[in-house]
Amino acid sequence: MSDTMPIEEYLLKGGVLTSPDNAPPRYRGELLRLMASFVDSELAGAAGFADTINDAPGIKERIASAKIVLEKTDHAGRVLEIMGSFGADTGRYAIHHPWDARLARDADIGAARQGGDMRLSVFHYPLQGWIDAVVMNVLMGTASTFQLRELTHVSYQPLADVFRAILPREAHHTDLGIEALNRIAESENGARAAREAIAYWRPRVAASFGLSASARFETLARFGLRHTPNEALMSEWRAAIDARLAACNLN
C-alpha cells in the first residue's frame, strides 16, 4: 500500500490487504461482520439440512445430503480460522449453539437478523420434508453461487482465497439439488409439491440479497468488500432460477 494514499482510496482502486495488522478498525469490523454472516449461515444451513437426511428417498440421496452437511461445516471452519486471526472469539462456536433453531413456518421477517447469531434470515425458516429441502437447496444454492462469486473479490486476500476454494463445492451442492429436483418433477404429485415449495421459498431467498440501493453496500464498496449492488446480484439470480425451473417444467 502507498505510504501517502488513504486506505479507502487504496481499497476502492482494487488494493488488497494480507494481514490483520494492516487493517484499520472500521475495516476490521465490517470484515468480521461479513465473515460471521457466512459462518453462521453455513452452520445453520448444515444443521437444518442434517435433519432431512433420513427423509431422503434413497441411499444416493442420503450420501449427497450428508456430503452437503459435511462440506458446509468445513466451509464454516475455514472462514472461522480467519476470524480467529483477527481476535474473534472462535471458542463460542465450539460450545452448544442452537444452529437448528427455526421460527414458525408462517413467520415473515424479511431480511431482518434474529436471535443470537448472524445467519441470513432465510435460515430461520424450517424445512418440511425432502421435496421442500431440495427446492430450498436449489433456490438458495443458486443464490449462494452469485453471492460467493462476489466474495471471491473481497479486498482481504486470505479470505478471497478461501472463498475461491469454497465456491466450486457450493456450486456442486446446487447441482446435486437440481439433479434431485429433476427426479421429483417427473411425477405429477412431486411437481405439485415442488411448485408449492418454490412459492414459499422464492421470496425468502430473494430477501437474502438485501435491500436495493443499500447504504451499507456503499460502505462495503469503499472498503473493497463488495463490488456488485444487491439488486444486480438478485437480477442475475432470478434469471438463473427462471431458466432452471423452466428446464424442470416447474415455472
Image (cartoon, grey):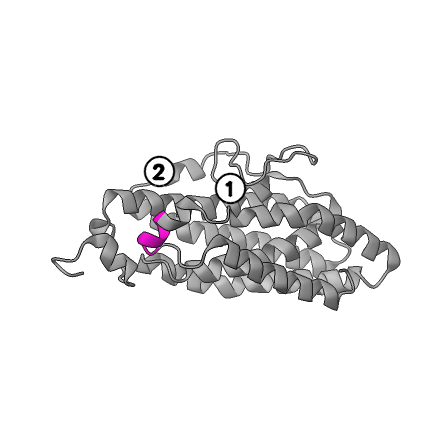
Q: Quadrant of the C terminus?
A: bottom right
Is 210 a magenta residue? no
Question: Mark 2 is on which residue type?
Answer: Asp
Instruction: Find the magenta span and give its range.
Output: 219-224
Tell me the SS state at disc 2: loop
From the viewer's perspective, tell me whether residue 206 is left or right of residue 184: left
From the viewer's perspective, tell me whether residue 85 is left or right of residue 217: left
Principal secondary structure, stretch drawn in magenta: helix
Observer-nearest of 181 and 11: 11
Q: Nearer the viewer, mark 1 or mark 2?
A: 1
What residue is drawn where x is 51% and y is 34%? 97
Mark 1 in CB contact with mark 2 (< 8 angstroms): no
Whether residue 2 is visible to the viewer of this picture, yes or no, is: yes
Give the residue at mark 2: 89
Tell me the SS state at disc 1: loop
Residue 92, image x, y percentages: 41, 35
Observer-nearest of 244 and 228: 228
Q: Which mark is residue 44?
A: none
Whether residue 81 is visible to the viewer of this picture, yes or no, is: no
How many neighbours does mark 2 have within 10 angstroms: few (below 14), some (14-19), or many (20 or more)?
few
Residue 91, image x, y percentages: 38, 38
What residue is drawn where x is 86% and y is 54%? 189
Q: Quadrant of residue 108?
A: top right
Question: Mark 1 is on which residue type?
Answer: Arg
- Residue projecting furthest to the right: 188
Give the residue at mark 1: 119
